[in-house]
Amino acid sequence: ANDVGMVAWLMELRTVEYPQGRQVVLIANDITHKAGSFGTREDVVFKLASEFAREKRIPRLYVAANSGARIGLADSVKQKFKVAFKDSSKPENGFDFIYVTKEDYVALTADRPRIQAEPTKYQGEEVYKVTDIIGSEPDLGVENLKGSGLIAGETSSAYNDIFTMTIVLGRTVGIGAYLVRLGQRTIQKTTASPIILTGYQALNKLMGVDVYSTNDQLGGPGIMYSNGVSHLAEPDHLRAVQAAINWLAYVPSHRGGLLPVMDIRGLDVIERPIGFCPARGTPYDPRMLLAGGEDDSGNWLSGFFDKDSFKETLAGWAKTVVVGRARLGGIPMGVVITENRTAENVKPADPADVKASEAVIQEAGCVWFPNSAYKTAQAINDFRTEDLPLIVFANWRGFSGGSRDMAGEILKFGAMIVDALREYEHPVYMYLPPHGELRGGSWVVVDPTINEDKMEMYADPDSRGGILEPSGISEIKFRAPDQLKMMHRLDDQLKMLDSELESSEFEDAKKEIEEQIKAREDALKPVYLAAATEFCDLHDKTGRMKAKGVIREAVPWEDSRAFFFYRAKRRMYEDNFVDQLKAIDPSTSREAAVNVLKSLYSGDWEDNKAVSAFYEQDLDKVNAKIGEMKKAAIQAKMDALKKELETM
């Protein structure tokens, strides 16, 4: 049997992506040892195992089943202390203090002090009033909290340094719950696995009434999957472990390593048109864009990613945004896409509040709310520490700016998206899908200037980008007086009436002409309002976006799969070479490093397919150039040192 309630393994997993094996560190509570509680020895094992994973830069998995920080009492003192009653004949009247006899005090402080006490008199006898109990046993109380802080800090560091994941297979309490959140990625078993800060019995005692009947009411999947603490909810142990292995399939074997690119021959085709295309003005499931699906007739319509490769996470939380991982031509990618349909945000009633009731909030599609903005930022941070390239299918009309959402910290969470993208270390592709819109503040928080070395923006020719929607722009910049001027400039009948009005000398005739003009204007108003709106809309099309340099290219949706595959493949090679060149000379800009690569290639530099083929086929040529530059840099340093020595 274990004498420490924490176990750690260095495991080698042989998977489809890594048939030669990949290493992971697995840490688990031993719930058979003191209910899986965290004492100082457990904390040390956890910390050392996590540090080992960070040192090797390999994934760290934690299987959580515990009862929180260990609680104990000093048994050596418990067997000896006595109670100084106010009236020993009537103990029900209460007591004054706890004490030990002189003999027991000497025994309890002989080798090392297990108590702190002060001498006093009780019933004419010299005794020692106990002021503090230290105990000789380990892990009785506050030292366990110090250990909990130790592993909380370690887990926070681990999330930033390596891939971390928690699989909750039993209750996890207190520090166990915080470790779940600090490790971020969480798979929770749907039964008997609550994530809680304290048990329901303790809360009932605190409130003096039996409000809660199970821990699931506090931290079961109904709470934690719905609020984004749990990324996935699985029905049993086996499926939870399977989900963890499937998740690892998208992640490099070690932080900063090469992506596990799969050979998709026989599963899908890279250069194929995308079968599913949304219709303008018709709500649709955004997952159809990503993964494809069947139409009303049962015919399969392919999506953007490889068939059956899209795995959604955080599906129970903030449903106006969809996030997950998928493969594009075998390349793993993180993905964020807008939900264009109205979603329901259900706020459960708290049993502790008799006046509370369940609230169902309708959240419009194509709008960022506080929860969905937070979800977007959280997902981007997760993808960053998984070393994944990211594609965002951007279709947002803006942020929800009502008083409730402003009070709900929408500004904070929107700013978090900018922070997450600024720190992103891998390629990010923003793509406006067909009939998609990106407007106002929602454009601002995803604009490529946030992280110019990594971010790129593209758009389908049928998408739109601008500050306001055309109808809103026309109300401000193309109002009714401007529309009337346009009528009188373009309509032949109005031009004729204007001419007659100007030449008429009789008031009665003028009045009649003015009435005819008014009638004609009223008849034309709907058409010219539509024309004004169309005029405003033409300012938001991809032609202007490209001309103004806010997008790199207009990419038709039907061809976008092949385009982004070759672009992503090219960037995989290119970024690796650029990093090597920057390592030779840290002052080298990305542009300068790319120009070095460009000098080695004689073809069309804008042809992603051709350039990626060049990197793949002429790898030795590129490596030779990098080696040559590295040798020159070393020689330059040696010459500089030699010159410095000569002047000394």
Image: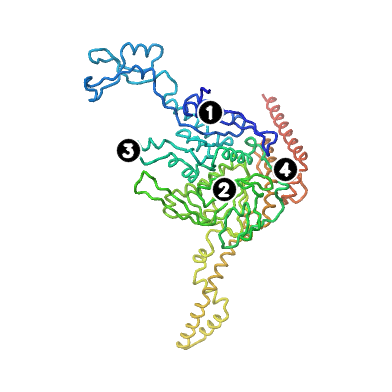
Q: Answer with mark 2 or mark 1, whichever residue precedes in sequence.
A: 1
Q: Answer with mark 3 or mark 1, whichever residue precedes in sequence.
A: 1
Are the residues at dot 2 and dot 3 in contact (C-beta closer than 8 Å)? no
Answer yes or no: is residue 453 visible: no
241 displayed left or right of 94: right
Spatial CA span between label 2 and label 3: 42 Å
Q: Answer with mark 2 or mark 4, whichever residue precedes in sequence.
A: 2
Are the residues at dot 2 and dot 1 in contact (C-beta closer than 8 Å)? no
**What's under tag 2, amino acid-wise?**
Val
Residue on which disc 3 sits: 208
Answer yes or no: is residue 581 visible: yes
**What's under tag 3, amino acid-wise?**
Gly
Residue on which disc 4 sits: 596
Q: Is residue 8 above or below residue 102?
A: below
34 displayed left or right of 633: left
Check disc 2 and report its element: helix, strand or loop: strand
Rendering coords of residue 181 (x, y %) = 50, 38
Q: Nearer the viewer, residue 451 or 107?
A: 107
Rendering coords of residue 368 (x, y %) = 50, 52
Q: Which label sits on residue 35?
A: none
Residue on which disc 2 sits: 323
Spatial CA span between label 4 and label 3: 73 Å
Rendering coords of residue 508 (x, y %) = 45, 88
Residue name at image x 49 percent, y 65 percent: 476
Q: Which dot, 4 or 1, sits closer to the camera?
A: 1
Q: Nearer the viewer, residue 2 or 541?
A: 2
Mark 1 burial class by Cα count in 10 Å: few <14, some 14-19, many 20+: many
Mark 4 burial class by Cα count in 10 Å: few <14, some 14-19, many 20+: some
